[in-house]
Amino acid sequence: MAKKNKHDQEETSPLSEELPAETDAVEVLPAEPTPDETLAALRQEAEQNRDLYLRARADLENYRKRAQRDKEDLARFANENILRGILPVLDNLERAVEHAGKDDKAQGSLLEGVQMTVDMFGRLVERFGVVPITTVGEAFDPSRHEAVGQIESAEYPPNTVVQELQKGYLLNDRLLRPAMVMVAKTPSPPVEAAE
């Protein structure tokens, strides 16, 4: 058997396998930003953060104002349901005064007592911010009046309130109950009799 020389062993060793040829392309690493570029980027980020801060602060301030307004509205209108319940009592007392006023002799003291009660109720609801809506002679306003019918009238122009059937009330300038009213309409022309 022939001995292999050292040179022959190198040719057959796994290390002697051919390595791939190096490519001509060179990998380009991103360049380090200059200090001016870094400073500009930081300034832009700081400006964005400042803008976000100012917006968040404005949103918080708006929320606080809205919460305060809601709190004030709750306090101003907390008695609304109670007052709605009181108003029919006041209506009935006013009707009793009106009815008793027609028969002066028999109902004098009753009328006086009921009128005092009506006045007391009126002052009570006024303390809570309830005021009656003026109606007769006013132009019909569907946001404050509830028309239940029309009456021909030469005295009032069309769409003017001519009669109040039930008072309407405002609670702190907000409608608590509309007034039930009759509204004027143009009189019909007279019908000529057939001859």
Image (spheres, rainbow, N blue to C red):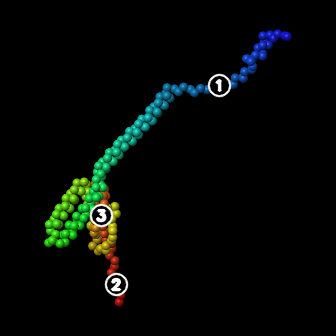
Amino acid carrying label 1: it is Val
- Is residue 150 toward the left or the right of residue 122 in the image? right
Residue holding disc 3: 179
Q: Give the number of the disc on residue 192.
A: 2
For disc 3, the neighbor class at 10 Å (few under 14, some 14 to 19, many from 20) is many
Q: Nearer the viewer, residue 122 or 107?
A: 107
Front position in the image: 161 or 103: 103
Foreground mark, 3 or 2, reads 3
Circle 3/circle 2 CB separation < 8 Å: no
- The answer to whether one can see residue 133 in this image is no
* The image quarter in which residue 112 lies: bottom left
Give the distance between the C-alpha atoms of the residues marked 3 and 1, in whole angstroms.
90 Å
Q: Is residue 55 left or right of residue 85?
A: right
Which of 119/140 is in front?
119
Name the residue at 28% across, 53% down: 79
SS label for mark 2: loop
Under mark 2, the amino acid is Glu
Up the image or down, 1 lies above or below 82; here it is above
Compare residues 43 and 88 and report the one nearer the observer. 88
Quadrant location, the N terminus: top right
First reached walking from the N terminus: tag 3 or tag 1: 1
Q: Could you tell which of marks 3 and 2 lies nearer the N-terminus? A: 3
Q: Residues within 10 Å of mark 2 (few under 14, many from 20)?
A: few
Residue 84 x, y percent position in the rendering = 29, 58
Label 1 sits on a secondary structure element that is loop
Instruction: Report the side of 40 relative to 192 (left or right).
Output: right
Give the quarter of the image for residue 173: bottom left
In the image as oriented, which residue stretches furthest toward the right?
1
Q: Which mark is residue 26?
A: 1
Looking at the rendered image, the disc whose residue lies closer to the viewer, 3 or 1, is 3
Picture coordinates of residue 131, whole percent (x, y): 25, 58
The residue under label 3 is which amino acid type? Answer: Ala
